[in-house]
Image: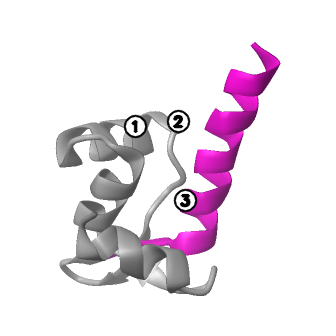
Amino acid sequence: MKPSIINFDSLPDSALVDDRTVAVVTGQSRNTVWRKAKAGTLPAPIKVGPKTTRWKVGAIRAYLESLTAGEVAA
């Protein structure tokens, strides 16, 4: 298991993570993460600096739960 996944599970919902962590946790490439965020199918990132963008852990957890709920309902 990658360190970012282990750390992700212990982070509070208010914590911020980068695109690499989102990619690992969701099982997608970084390009797909950005494409889905732009399309609105992944939670929107938060701009925290001129060259720094992050996602809230709680938003990513909710996204993952919605995917799981969709699988159960299908």
Compute the Cα span from label 3 to label 1. Answer: 12 Å
Which residue does the numbered mark 3 point to in the structure image? 60
Out of 35 and 62, give the one closest to the viewer.
62
Q: Answer whether labels 3 and 2 touch (C-beta < 8 Å).
A: no
Q: Answer whether labels 2 and 1 touch (C-beta < 8 Å).
A: yes
Give percent across and percent down for residue 39. Answer: 44, 33
Which residue lies at the image location 33% right of the left edge and 43% below the top edge? 27
Give percent across and percent down for residue 37. Answer: 42, 45
> What type is the residue that disc 1 sits on?
Lys
Whether residue 11 sits left or right of residue 20 in the image: it is: right
Q: Which residues are magenta?
A: 53-74
Q: Say what secondary structure mark 2 lies in.
A: loop
Out of 14 and 53, give the one closest to the viewer.
14
Q: Which mark is residue 36?
A: 1
Compute the Cα span from label 3 to label 2. Answer: 11 Å
Predominant SS of the magenta segment: helix
Whether residue 67 sits left or right of residue 34 in the image: it is: right
